[in-house]
Amino acid sequence: MFSDRNFCFLPLKAEIRHMCSFLLVYIPVLALGIPLNAIAFWVFCCKIKRWTETKVYMINLIVADTFLLFTLPFLLYFTEYIHPIDWLCLTIQSIYFINMPMSIFVITLIAIDRYIAIKFPLKAKILRSPLKSASACGFLWIAMITYSISYCTHRSNKEVFCFRKQSLLPKYSSLFYSICGYFIPLGIVMFCSVQVIRCLKKKMATCPHETKLFQKAVQIVSVNLCVFAICFSPFHIAVLLRFAVEAAGACSLMPGVITYIKVSACLANCNCCLDAFCYYFAAKEFPEFSSMFPKHMDKKGLMLT
């Protein structure tokens, strides 16, 4: 490994050795993610006819997860074999880098929408609508696609091989990416989730006959928050750690940091399978979905996701 005061260099072998770990994670992710997302897309688009805020958010989340699943075989190939940066590489990189921020922001919108619906039920009729949800998601797609294309194009001017970052210069854009792209949304999701849980617990005291229903709702909110934090926090902590190591010029620590980034990225990408729980709980609130499994579905529901 070459190093000087302001520059680190990562050999290609440090990237290649993670291939076995990728296969162990991404093959099951593909095997589970493709059918789960296909079923979810079929349910929300074909079986559920009524358009609601929940349906809009779920479809956008499914599309984001599908983009990730589409790029994983290419990611495995580009990791195993050295591939130059060309139009195919730039296309796959652009699609791949859309998924995580798009998923994070859509989940954040879901948390805000849930908070408004539970905390301010009267104002919710004015603040919430499927059209407003679709407009917000449309704005996010435009912003994320623009960001991803510009990021990958800028990166292609400094790198030689696809998905193989070798020059490890500190980037302040990494700080911006993690703080604005995750930690601020995490704070919003945590705030909204805690407020919703508090509101539901108050309703338990005033409506004891609905206690079981509200307990299920609290569990759904809690599980969604935990999955969000567990999947995405390690990767963005790793991004901040990499920036600190690069800024300090501590090249000897870089192989360990890169390994941590690869492992945490695998965990973050597993979210496209774990989102299936979100789809299930959301679909349960629609009569069309409940009628598909009349013997197993509850008759009562509380719109949360």
Image: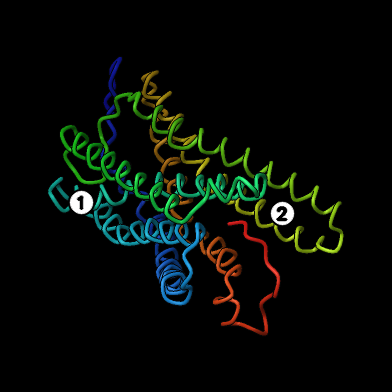
Q: Nearer the viewer, residue 268 or 260?
A: 268
Between discs 1 and 2, the one toward the N terminus? 1
Q: Is 87 situated left or right of 187 in this image?
A: left
Camera-near label (1 vs 2) is: 2
124 left or right, relative to 300: left
Q: Is residue 1 or residue 82 the one in the foreground?
A: 82
Q: Give the structural element (helix, strand or loop) at label 2.
A: helix
Q: Amino acid at mark 1?
A: Thr
Residue type for callout 2: Val
User: What residue appears at the point 66 percent right and 57 percent down from the top-left corner?
Assistant: 220
Left or right? Give the position of 194 relative to 1: right
Q: Residue at x 41, y 71 (%)?
A: 45
- For residue 280, what is the image quadrant? bottom right
| Depicted 121 relative to depicted 39: above or below | above
- The image shows residue 296 at horizontal and vertical percentages of 67, 80
Question: Which mark, by number, is residue 218?
Answer: 2
Which residue corresponds to mark 1? Answer: 91
How packed mark 1 is, by other alpha carbons closer than 10 Å (few <14, some 14-19, many 20 or more), is some
The correct choice, above or below, for 62 with respect to 87 in the image is: below
Residue 106 drawn at (x, y percent)? 46, 49
Tell me where residue 4 sits by quadrant: top left
User: Given the current orientation, which residue lies at the most extreme top position?
Assistant: 5
- x 75%, y 58%: residue: 214
Q: CA distance from mark 1 to mark 2?
A: 41 Å
SS of the residue under disc 1: helix
**Percent from the top left, x then y, of residue 268?**
46, 49
Which quarter of the rendered picture does the C terminus lie within? Answer: bottom right
Confirm or deny contact between disc 1 and disc 2 (CB under 8 A): no
* Quarter occupied by the N terminus: top left
